[in-house]
Image (spheres, rainbow, N blue to C red):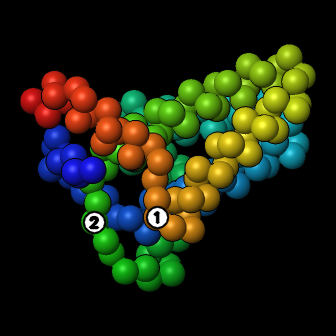
Amino acid sequence: MANVCSINGNKMNAPTASVLAALATLVVGLAIITQTPVIFIFGAVVFFIRGFYQKEWCVLTFSSTNISNLLKFKNKLIEPEGKRFTSKIGFIFSVLFFVIGIYSFAARVSWLGVFFMSYALLNVAFSFCIGCQVYTWYSNLNPRLHE
């Protein structure tokens, strides 16, 4: 699949995105283990800020950038549009976690969380972003995104 060009010309660092995926995996894992609604709300807020607002205001973005700088990962710039789309999907998942968790369906929250975490771990381990692939596929079907 062809890569989608960024609308605003901004780029993001791939290792920082992988660290962010690792942090998101930790948040989801902690939420599943503790079944605490506050953690689900935290995840929803984080993904909302990253997907719909300004990622610079997100605590996980700040943390992942600092961790990447501390560990001195080599910069590899990528297009951010797929990651932004993935954050929107993360927001939807987080809201689902919260709603399902309110009704005490722990098994369903656990399975949904493992599903979400497996996608995030693919990004961490192999720099393979399923949300980015879906975004690329969708944007190729919807030419208005390129205008």
* Residue on which the image places disc 1: 127
Q: Which of 111 and 25 lies nearest the eye of the viewer?
A: 111
* Residue on which the image places disc 2: 77
Residue occupying image coordinates x 63% and y 38%: 43
Residue occupying image coordinates x 26% and y 34%: 139
Residue 110, picture quadrant: top right
Residue 73, how many percent across, how many down? 43, 79
**Badge 2 element:** strand
Residue occupying image coordinates x 43% and y 69%: 15
Q: Residues within 10 Å of mark 1 (few under 14, many from 20)?
A: some
Q: Which of 18 and 141 lies nearest the eye of the viewer?
A: 141
Residue 48, how many percent across, how many down? 49, 32
Q: Height in image: 144 above or below 23?
A: above
Residue 25, how many percent across, how many down? 66, 53
Q: Which of 36 and 143 lies nearest the eye of the viewer?
A: 143
Is 97 displayed left or right of 33 in the figure? left
Q: Height in image: 112 above or below 95?
A: below
Q: Can I make out residue 44 in this image?
A: yes
**Are discs 1 and 2 less than 8 Å apart at CB?**
no
- Judged from this view, the residue extending furthest toward the left is 147
Residue 69, picture quadrant: bottom left
Amino acid type for the residue under numbered disc 1: Ser
Query: Mark 1 vs mark 2: which is more N-terminal?
Result: 2
Alpha carbons under labels 1 and 2: distance apart: 12 Å
